[in-house]
Image (tube, grey):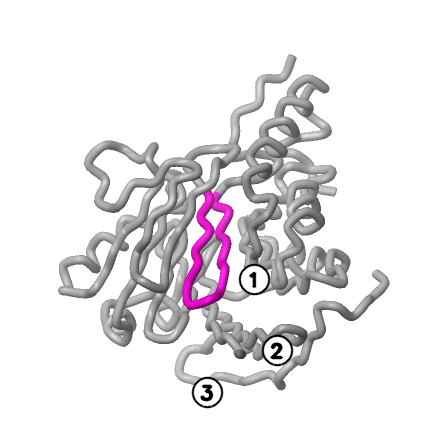
Amino acid sequence: MDKQVKIIYYYNSGFSVQVGSTLLLFDYWEGEGRKLSESVRITPSFLKAFEQIFIFVSHGHPDHLDPIIYTWAKENLPITYIVSNDMPIGTVGKRMAPLQVKELTRDISVKAFQSTDLGVAFLVHAYGLNIFHAGDLNLWHWRQESTLREIEAAEDAFYEAMKPMKDEKIDVAMFPVDPRQGMMYDAGANHFIMTQKPRVFIPMHWQERPEIAIDFARRGKTPHTEILAMTKPGMVANMTFSDQVLDIHIIEPPKDMEDVPIQPIRKLDPYAKEPGEDPFTDTDLPVDIE
């Protein structure tokens, strides 16, 4: 039986995933100074179209948690918040620790995984689809800046965090590809694709450098994984999954009051074979240079 999902990209690591009348919202942030245009921002009127809404916050970094998400609860909307267990006491939401599982409804459950930074990663099982949002789980290394010991520690932490996912099937994954790491910035993403083999991989956290996501999509595709660069706020990907074929229909974001241009349907076969430097400036994790 075919399974359908609608994914909208917002900003940084923020995505909504619509499955039927259910909305899953991950790490929503409108950027510093509200960079998202009004035509793209999530509003209570948009949320009223859904019978149930689950809002996930992987950790407390400002670029993954926009306080505006909590204002929606005042609108009498069917919202449930799911947050990492290291969020400050008093944070609204069901708290989740690594490897904890919560049944949200009869058809939806979520499992949390250890991050290599703050918080957790989420794997949501919804109506037969498996949707993974990494939060800040990544192989956080800085080849040009760190000592060998620091790099080895980062690798060990990442591989250890990945172990519990070994047998998990993933249909759609959203995962960091952060160019601030410099050389081999995509090592974590490549390892994730090789080991987990998600059917669709969407780069995120690419620091307002869409060319990073586009280049990774061009060269990172494998026979098992299609890589989709969603680089514009408001960009929509309608996906239909069957056992052997994956169809993706891309809709470009709205431009003010203009009509939304629609691209032709791209029929992608995840089993088809295809052949296929940035200076360190900042990071999500502190690094002590010896």
Count neighbours of disc 1 (C-alpha within 10 A) and say few if under 14, some if 14 to 19, many if 20 or more. Answer: some
Residue at image coords 62%, 84%: 265
Left or right of 48, for residue 163: right
**Residue depth check, mark 3 versus mark 1: number of the one nearer the observer:** 1
Does dot 2 land on a helix, a strand or a loop? strand
Contact between labelled residues 2 and 1, with CB atoms less than 8 Å apart? no
Q: In which quarter of the image is the C terminus?
A: top right
- Distance, label 1 to label 2, CA atoms, is 13 Å
> Any mark on residue 171, and which?
1
| Residue at the farthest top position | 290
Query: Label 3 belongs to which residue?
Result: 259
x, y percentage for residue 179?
64, 44
Specify the amino acid type for callout 2: Asp
**Residue wearing tag 2:** 247
Mark-to-mark CA distance, 2 and 3: 23 Å
The residue at the point 75 percent across, 68 percent down is 271
Is 92 located above or below residue 22 in the figure?
A: above
Q: What element carries label 1?
A: loop
First in sequence: mark 1 vs mark 2: 1
The answer to whether 232 is drawn above or below residue 263 in the figure is above
Tell whether position 230 is magenta. no
Residue 42's spot in the image, x, y percent? 32, 66
Q: Tag 3's secondary structure?
A: loop
Task: Specify which label sits upstream in the sequence, 2 or 3.
Answer: 2
- State whether the magenta stretch is mostly helix, strand or loop: strand
- What residue span does the magenta drawing correspond to? 121-135
Which tag, 3 or 1, sits closer to the chain's start?
1
Residue at 43% across, 38% down? 99
Disc marking residue 46: none
